[in-house]
Image: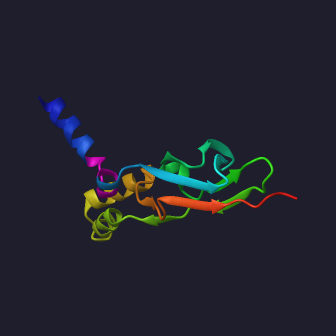
């Protein structure tokens, strides 16, 4: 019984507001004209445009997205993120010296749950190469 209680306490202590309420993955829609361009995240192919793709927040933080299509110039742009509200709740607990606030804040940072994408859709037009 003590082991089960201990496991429960440890599992609870590793949860945090941003992790619980906003998760650690996001579905983002990538659109381009013309369609079916390859989508690269930090140089790694993750799919094609005109689709929704699930990205782990840890991968998307400080990432660059590139659309590539033969006959067109590559288009590279930043994947912008914003801090989720749940993170600030933990952050306040951290500065108040509340031990759970410290643990929860570190969990949000470690999982990148605090960094939600600024945009759910990226829509771009590719220029023909010369």
The spot of residue 62 in percent (x, y) is 58, 59
Frontmost residue, 19 versus 81:
81
Residue 125, above or below 11: below
Q: Is residue 14 magenta?
A: yes
- Asked whether, in this view, residue 121 is left or right of residue 17, the answer is right
The spot of residue 82 in percent (x, y) is 46, 66
The spot of residue 38 in percent (x, y) is 67, 45
- The quarter of the image holding the C terminus is bottom right
- Asked whether, in this view, residue 33 is left or right of residue 122, the answer is right
Q: Which residue lies most toward the left here?
A: 1
The image shows a total of numbered marks equal to: 0
Display coloring: rainbow
Task: Residue at 11%, 28% (x, y): give it.
Answer: 1
Residue 5 in view: yes
Magenta part mainly helix, strand or loop? helix
Frontmost residue, 63 versus 35:
35
- Asked whether, in this view, residue 26 is left or right of residue 72, the answer is left
Q: Which residue lies most toward the right here?
A: 130
Task: Residue at 33%, 66% (x, y): give it.
Answer: 85
The spot of residue 78 in percent (x, y) is 62, 62
Q: Is residue 58 magenta?
A: no
Residue 78 in view: no
Q: Quadrant of residue 47?
A: top right
Frontmost residue, 64 versus 111:
64
Task: Residue at 45%, 54% (x, y): give it.
Answer: 112
Q: Which residues are magenta?
A: 13-20
Task: Residue at 14%, 32% (x, y): give it.
Answer: 2
């Amino acid at each position: 019984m003590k082991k089960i209680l201990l496991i429960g306490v440890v599992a609870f202590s590793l949860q945090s507001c941003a992790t619980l309420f906003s998760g650690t993955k996001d579905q983002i829609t990538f659109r381009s004209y013309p369609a079916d361009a390859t989508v690269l995240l930090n140089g790694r192919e993750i799919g094609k445009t005109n689709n929704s793709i699930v990205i782990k927040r840890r991968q998307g933080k400080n990432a660059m997205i590139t659309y590539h299509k033969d006959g067109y110039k590559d288009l590279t742009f930043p994947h912008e993120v914003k801090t989720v509200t749940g993170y600030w709740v933990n952050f306040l607990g951290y500065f108040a010296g509340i031990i759970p606030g410290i643990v929860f804040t570190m969990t949000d940072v470690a999982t990148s749950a605090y960094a939600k994408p600024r945009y759910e859709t990226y829509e771009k037009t590719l220029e023909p190469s010369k």
